Each structure stands twice: as C-alpha cells, then as structure tokens.
Amino acid sequence: MTRSRRLALLLLPAALALFLAALPGHAQQEVSSRYAFADTTLLRDTLGLSFPRLFPLADSLSLTPDTLRALAVRYKWSLERLVWLSDSLRMPVDSVGVFLDRERFNPLSSTITRLTTFRYNSGYNVQQTSTSWSNSGDYKLVVGSLFLQNTTNVQMDRYNAGTRTSLRQTRSSVTEGGWRFSPNLSLGARANLDRFNSFDPGSVNNQGEKKNEFQVSLRTRQQPTSALKSEVNFFTGLLDLANYQQVKRGASADLNGTVRLQTRYLTHDLSGQVNGNLSRTSVPRAPNRVGTNDLSNNLRGTLGILPGLPVGINLNYAIRRIRVETPTDTGTIQQLRTFSGNADAGLRLRLDNDRYLNVSGRYGSQDQAQGGALNSQSSRVERGFSIDGRYLLMGWSLESHFSNGRTVSEYPTRDVSGGYGERLVAPSFDATVTRNLTQKMLLRATGSVGLSSYRYYIIGSYKSPQVDRDQYRQNYRIEAQYNMSSRFNSGVALDVTRNVLVNIPAGSTASNNEASSYRAEWRWSFHVMPGLTATQNNSIGADYMHYNFLPSGDRLSLSYNTVTSLNAVLSPRFTVDIRHNARHQPAGAYTQLADGLYYLSRSEVSDNYTLSARLAYTPSKAFSLVMQPDYLAGERDGATSGILAPTRTSRQLNFSGGASLNLPIGAKGRLTGDVLRTYRDDRAINYTSGGLVQPQPRTESDFWNGSLQLTWEL
Amino acid sequence: MGAVIRLRPLRAGLVLGLLGALLAGCDLFKPATPETGGGGASLIANYSTPDSCLRYIEVGIERKDAVGQTAYLGALADSGKGDGVGFHAFFDPVVWNAYTGFKPADWNLDYETQFLPLFIQKYADPYQVTWLPDVYHPHDDEIDADHMILHRRYEVRALRQVTGDTLLIAVGYADLYFTRITTSRWAMVRWEDRVDPNVGAEPANPVQRCFGYRRLNGSGG
C-alpha cells in the first residue's frame, strides 16, 4: 500500500470523528482531572501578581501555562486583564503587549491634545566575570496638533578576563516630531541613530558601527466602513552606515501598512512592509565605491472564517523576500537573497473546550543564496498536515494528535563537485486519556509513536552525502494519583521509551542500535502540621542499549534516585526549605564468558548527594533576606581488571546570601531586584588506574552577583 | 436523550478503535529494514555524563567520518527524537554583529548537522580537539541533579602533515548547558559561544576564529 493511500485511510476516521464532533453536545462535565498533573509551582504569586485559573485559561487559549504566566509577569497584568485586552483588541494574547507598546508611539492612536510623559528604566546586572548596565528612557509630548517623542536605549557590557576587560556598547535613539493634521493624518520627521562598539584587548580590529537615518514620516489611517480599518505609513530620507566591513551612504525608504477587516463571519488581518535603500557603498580593500540596492518585502496575514461559531476556518500566510548587496574586494557586487513563504490552513470544529477537532495543512518554502560562493545555496520545501482533537466521554478525557510532514532540503553547492538533497518524512501520533477513577484517585495514560525517515540523493558528483536512516521512537506513560485527604497525597508512574536507529546501507549498519528506557516513580506529599510539608520523589530507572550487529557494545545503566524536601513556614515572614537528593547509578557492559553467554558486569558506579537549604525572611513586602547554602558530594568508581575502584571523589560547598528588593521610590518609581554575595569552594581527588591519589587544587571563589532595576515615570 | 448519550461512547470508541487499528496495521511507523551485513565502522558512544558528551564531541570531530558525526550529534539534544528539548547555539554579540552574510534566527540542530561536515572537511589534515578549563569560570555549575553548565575553553588544531606543525583553526570559550535526558544519557541543549579576549573577534591571524564564526561562515572562511 502506498503512503498516500495509507494517509487517505487515516483521514477516514478523522472525517468520522469530525462528523461526531459537530453534533450538538450534552451537558458539560467537570474535567479538573486534566490539570491534576500540572506544574503547580507556576501558580505561585510573584511581584504582586496571582495566577488563578492559569491552566484552564492557557488550555483554552492554546498556549502553554508557562508562556501565559510569563506574559502576565512581563507586562505586570493580571490574567483577567490580559485576556480582557486580548478579547477587546481581538488579537492573540501574545500580541497584546507588543501591540500596546507599539501604539504608545503612534501619534494617531491618541486624541489627547496636551500630554507629557516620561519613563526611565535603569538596570544593573553583575555576575562573576561580567557586568551589564542598561539605561532606557522614553519621552512623549503632545501640544495640540504637535507631537514629539523619543526612545533611547543604552547598554554597556563589560567582560572581565583576568586583568583584561572586553567592552560591548549598544546605543540607539529614535526621535520623531510632527504635526497631526487630523485624527487620520500626521506628517513629521524622524531620526534613527544606532551605535555599536566592541573592544577586545586581543583584537587587531576592534569594531564599531554607526548608523544614522534621517527621514520624513507620513502616517495615515483609514476607516471606509465600520468593519474595515487600515493604516499606511511611509518614511523616507537619508542613510549613513559605517562599520568595520563597509561604508554605505544613500537614501532609504520604508512603506508599511495594515488592513483589518472584521465582520461577524469573517476577520482578515493583513500587514505588509517594503523597505530598502539606494546607496553608494565601499569596502576597505575595494578600489572604488559602487552602487548597491537593498530591498526587503514582507507580507503576512490571518484570515478567520466564522470565528465565533462552532465550525470555523483559519488561514495564516506569510511571504518574505530579502535582497542585500555587498561589494566584494574586487569591486563586483555580491547579492545575498533569501526567500521564505508559508501558509497553513485549519478547519476547526469546536463544541466547547472539552470537545473539539482541528484539521490543518501547511506548506512552507525557503530559499537562500549568497552570490556564487560555495555552500551558500540552500532550499527547503515542507508540506504536512495534522489532526488533533479532544473528547470528553463519560468522565474520560481523550486527547489525540496525528501529524505527518514531508520536507525536501537541497544543498547543491557543498563543494565544487556539487551537493546533496535530503527527503524527510516524519509521521507522529500521540494520545492521552485522563480519568477521575474515584473521588480520590486520578489516572492518566499517554502514548506516542513517531518515525523520522531520512533519504539522501546526490546533486552533481558530490562524494560525501549522509547515510539513509530511520529513527523510530515510541513511549508510553501511565500515572495515577491518590489524594487521600487535604494533608496527604501520593502518586505512582511508569514510563517506557524505545528508540531505534536504523542506518540502511550495509556499510553503515554496525552502529544500528535500540535503546529501551524504563522508569518507575513514586511520590508523596504530607502536610505534617500547619506550616510544615514533607515531599518525597523516588524513582528507579534502567536504560538498555543494544547494538544489533555489535552485541559486545550492549550496555545497561541503572539509576536509583530519592529527593526529599521539607517546606516550613515558621512564621508569616520566615520560611525554610530543605532539600536532599541522593542518586546511585551503577552501569556496566555485557561480557561473553566461557559458556558463550553474555553477562552483565558492572564497570562504573557513581553516587551523588546534594543537601541544599533556602531561608527567606521577609520583614516587609519591599524587602526580604535570603540565605541559600548547598553542599554537593560525588563519588565515582570504575572497573580495573573487573574490580571496582574509586576514580574520582569531589566535594563542593556553595553559599549565597543577600537581599531582594521591591521598593517604591516616591509615588511613581520602583526599585526591584536582588543583590547576593556568593561563596564557593570546590575540591576533587582523582585516582589513577593503579589507585594512586591525584588531589586536584582546591578552588575558591567569592563574588557579588544579582541585578537591580529602577523604573520611574513622570 | 438517554439513548443518544449511550450511543456516543460507541461512536467515539469506534473512531478511536478504527484509528488505532489503521495506525497499527498500515506500517506507517515501521522503520525500514537495513541491508544485511552489519558493516562499517562503529563507535560505542557513552553520554552518561556531561564530560563524556564533550569527549564524544571531541572524538566526533577528530574522526572526520560519518561515524564521528553521529557521535558528535548524539551528544546534542534533539527535540525531534523525543528528547523534550532541542539544541541551540548562541553567538558572541560581536561576532553576530560583524557577520554580514546570512544569519539564522535560531541556530538549531538542523544547522549544526549541516555545519559539522563542512567544518571537518575544511582542512584535509587530521584534527585535534582540546577542551581546557575556562580560567574565567573555573567552576562548573550544577543547577540541579538533571541540569549542568560546563565552562570550557576549546581549541581545534589541524595537524599539518606536510609541514609537521599545527594550525589553530578554532579557539574560544563556551558555556555549555547540559540536561539529563534519560538515566544514562545527558545531552547538550545550549552552546553559548564567547570570543577569547586575547584573540578577539577580528584576530591578527584570521584563521584563529571562534566556533560561532565558524558556524556562521559555514565552510570556515
């Protein structure tokens, strides 16, 4: 059966499922079990933010919980506010912050006739061998129809290497002033200034780049109907770029715009940009300046059909084309051309958050070429489709995802003789079942399988193509959690993975192998008394590596791991966390004995122990003291003539102590961050194969580290 | 209504069963059968510690053959293979800023796979790779039991057969982030490259480049 017929067969149940999913649903059931195994550390409050309903919200927005949390922390908005802004602006949650930041500097976005704002941020970050100091300010003034705005960023990094210091400095400033003729038209002038400097003590040519652009700016807005809005902006002016590689002077222009159509049944967001320059460019070793012409086109759009209905279609597309011209030392012009285009279309059937089916297809293409230089050309074409769905069935939450993709990549000029092409076919399937077995017991089972088939063909007479191969992977994991009471819960899990590497040509099959991993886990958490919680994670694991044609290379590694932690809240202001980790890892190879059979013989054993604590005292919301000692001990034994003997012993002590700040500075300023002093002591002893002790020198370090950020607004 | 509710599990079960049967029966996920033989060179790589990963990266470059490349790439995390995390390389800002050719937004395992054969074929002479302590970061960082950062100075030399001397073709520092993937396998997830300040981003000897420049420049310039 051909692959295409197999895939057609696969679509049959998908179509059936689609039919089922489109039918009216019955009463929604509670599916909290889906989030029972989620990482609850993400729910911890930070910077005055809390994250209620993080997992259901992230699930319904098709984001990972940590991404949604990071967005909330980055913009210091609550989840409710973030989602409300996303709804009201009708854009994805991860675009809201970027959009609002950009609109702050769009003179047409505001109808205020008198405004003065100023915001200043300063951050200082110090690490063991580097420091970084950043300063940024943005200023906006509106007086009637006149506006003036500026954004400036300065960052200075220092890297200390013994007595030598490397410096990197980046500075940028954008200033725009103008006149808003009407709410839909403004005209002004803009200056973009960028600087980059680098100094390395050992460099013969330290770098610097200076870029100045002075432009006329035209911003317009249109709204022909209530459903259609657009923006067109145009900037043009003079370009002056000078760096170590080239000096480029000429005229530059940037035309960009967006169109947004929004009706009840159709939404379409389209944005495009064309920018480029006409310049005279010189390079250090070229005899003359030559004319160069850079051009970049970018178009992207999102089309949504029936966005608010149970059945909808989404289409995303993007096309990007870039051409950059650089003179060579001989005075000719070398062109760097890149092109990328991609589109994905999806059919979405959704009854509610627990019953949906998505079918999508994608196509992408990418080309890159840099003059006629060797190894400068490559192309890639990707086609694929995926089906994913979720169905809640009598308390069982079923989730599944299937995808298949075919990618063809070509590298035609690897050397003078030619190059090669690669065909990759990569189907994958995974499914998850979650169920509340009883009120106190949850069950989740997950399975996945995937295959990546790489096939190569020669272009020209290239002699070193890669080897045809298949990589297969399957995994299943079954886990159960028992919540006996609010004070005690426990869980077990079994995880099994199999990886197979198959090199296909006979001349390269010696390294074909199969790796099987088994891992069992048991964890429990006990709320011993008010303010004290004990948690323990135990796991045992075994990795079997089998070489199909080289059994003497077979290997087994075992692992026994226990992590115990105590979390104590001694008072509302004082917490103590203690953690102990013990890991024992024997490993060995299989040796053939006189009876012809292979036996496992231990060839190495490693033991690692970590004891760490964290003490935090928070006398106020603005200030807390932290102490964090860690002690690590490691022992490693290796086999010599079949007898285990020590090969390495190591000890390490780390101690960090310092303060965290979240201080208001006046009514509109804030100082946040932490300052720590870290002490570290490290000692190791190596043993030769004869058992001789080779002590390594003891190393100590003691340094300040941390970061502070000051924010102030007028 | 009750009848409808009873039928739905049947329908959904039928779909799941049919889907599973098709996936299992159509061999879509069955790897190809290799040609018989068991021939070719083999290398039993061991990635049981971050240091042993570095050892097989070293061996992978020095062997300069397909087996070596497999050993090198095996030390890097591959999200497509189910590692759960992928390999990414980062560049010293001064190298990134100075380079005028194509600069990928994300240097991942795909790019590393394409780069490696070009690097090892750049010079026909045998290579020698040395990992040295990073004098500016003498301690490796053990983040927790499953995550480590090794700080190393690297030197790659071409052992010139004609003249008998060595040519330093890659030198610099790297902060190397490792994650434990399974009980016995660690993999590098991040290579943060740093220019040796004594050599500089534009070195007096233009051959003595850092790995970041070698990566961007493909065949090595």
Image: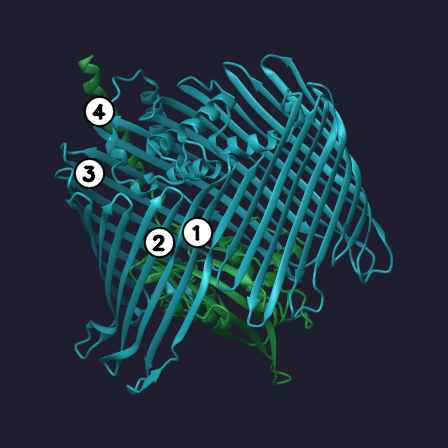
Q: CA distance from mark 4 to mark 1?
A: 55 Å
Is disc 2 placed on a helix, strand or loop?
strand
**Where is residue A706 drawn, in percent x and y?**
46, 55
Residue kind at label 4, given as amino acid type? Pro
Chain of the residue where label 4 is placed in the rendered structure? B
Q: CA distance from mark 1 to mark 3?
A: 41 Å
Marks 1, 3: nearer the viewer: 1
Residue annotated with mark 1: A674
The residue located at (65%, 62%) in the rendering is A417
Numbered badge on residue B9 = 4
Residue A484 makes an appearance in the image: yes
* Chain B rendering hue: green
Circles 4 and 3: CB atoms closer than 8 Å: no
In the image: residue B56, left or right of residue A612: right
Residue annotated with mark 3: A443
Chain of the residue where label 3 is placed in the rendered structure? A
Query: Where is the N terminus of chain B found, in terms of image quarters?
Result: top left
Marks 4, 3: nearer the viewer: 3
Marks 4, 1: nearer the viewer: 1
Front residue of this view, candidates A33 and B144 = B144
